[in-house]
Image (tube, coloured by chain):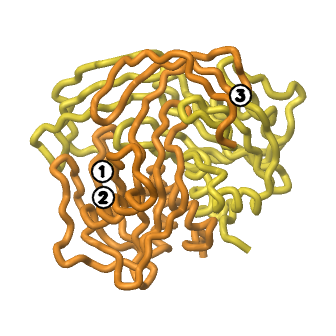
Chain colours: A orange, B yellow
Amino acid sequence: MKGGNWKTISSERHFVDRNLEVVTDRVQSPARPDPRTWTVVYRKAAVVVAPMTRDGKIILIRQERIPIRQAIWEMPSGQIDDDNADQDRIKDVALRELREETGYELAPGGELVPLGHYFSSPGFTDERGYLFLARSIQPCAEGPSREEGESILDCRQFTVAEIRRMIADNEICDANTLGICATLAARGLLSLAPR
Amino acid sequence: MKGGNWKTISSERHFVDRNLEVVTDRVQSPARPDPRTWTVVYRKAAVVVAPMTRDGKIILIRQERIPIRQAIWEMPSGQIDDDNADQDRIKDVALRELREETGYELAPGGELVPLGHYFSSPGFTDERGYLFLARSIQPCAEGPSREEGESILDCRQFTVAEIRRMIADNEICDANTLGICATLAARGLLSLAPR
């Protein structure tokens, strides 16, 4: 589904800082060679990690999110600073975010399972999140080491039944967490079916 | 989890058009009374509709998405132009988008089931999508009526088993579709479990 004849004819940049770039592009697409004008927010890619304990519980963090003026329970995540990061480098970022935000790391014999990527809002941004299952995990000796700009209020384990109830009741309400849960369920790695 | 003492101390607008507004806010939060500076992309809310036929199939559209330079299979969706829309008005938008993008409408006795909302990327935007299940649906007499700016290439029915496989294989890769599938699964309205 990728590829084809996409061509950017012109780009007008309106705003840029270290987190986003706002550009109006004129674009020819495979289906529409007549150029269309579209305003796009370009963003770094991100990692999203589902941390699973040996007994199948999931770790979520509760974080204040300024754009929505709310604190929400969500999977640990973070941006990938290097635009050209390969799969190994992306995995390093995932393990670092896991450690920093939750204070957990892979247990001996544990693995980071890549689950593909998703687009958060492809109507206006190219932002993508690379999804990983970290299984099994254990607390690290040094605990979490959270960045100054972040505001993580809490971090705890949830059973899969609790995760399912929180999704059904709209308490889990962010694309990262819903997207990774749908992917884990479709791969048979987590059951979202009610009892 | 909402509410608490959120206070916007100042806002500097960098860019605005009819689709998005880019603002750097200085904000006090309940957990962090020391003001933080954050750049936010404010966007209209959206509707996302899972259209289900009488025999349990799901309709997806295949759409060119300029920001990611790809055509992807996804649930029908659209923006809510009225910022103060109430639940009835939001439902009207959902039914209109369903009709325009897929050419389907609710069958006699069918209903639009509200499934809550989700945030597409709460680290940088306030964009939220209101999720609905439309069940059962039937083709409308007049067919789809797509807008000029859109580029919908295809529209067809998928079994739930096909949806599950497409999520597992990363062919379904947008937050709208993954988010609504996770919510439907957690409510027992669609099974993502592999056979």
Q: Residues within 10 Å of mark 3 (few under 14, many from 20)?
A: some
Tag on residue A30?
3
Q: Earlier in the sequence, mark 1 or mark 2?
A: 2
Q: Look at label 1 and name its amino acid.
A: Ala
Asked where in the image residue B154 lies, by quadrant, the reply is top right
Taking A149 as reference, is B36 above or below it? Answer: above
In whole angstroms, how far apart are the C-alphas of marks 3 and 1?
A: 42 Å
User: Subunit of mark 1?
Assistant: A
- B62 over A95 or under it: above or below: above
Residue A160, how many percent across, how many down?
Answer: 48, 73
Position of A64 with respect to B134 (left or right) is left
Judging from the image, mark 3 belongs to the subunit labelled A
Q: Are marks 1 and 2 in contact (CB under 8 Å)?
A: yes
Kind of element beneath mark 1: strand
**Callout 3 secondary element:** loop
Say which of B58 and B174 sits in front. B174
- The residue under label 1 is A71
Q: Quadrant of residue A145?
A: bottom left
Please give the name of the residue rendered at 81% of the width and 47% of the height, measured from the top-left corner: B157
Front of the two marks 3 and 1: 3
One can see residue A164 in this view: yes
Which dot marks residue A62? 2
Left or right placement of residue A12 versus residue B132 in this view: left
Frontmost residue, A167 versus A6 = A6
The residue drawn where x is 68% and y is 29% is: A5
Sequence-wise, the earlier of marks 3 and 1 is: 3
What residue type is disc 2 on? Answer: Arg
Q: CA distance from mark 2 to mark 3?
A: 42 Å
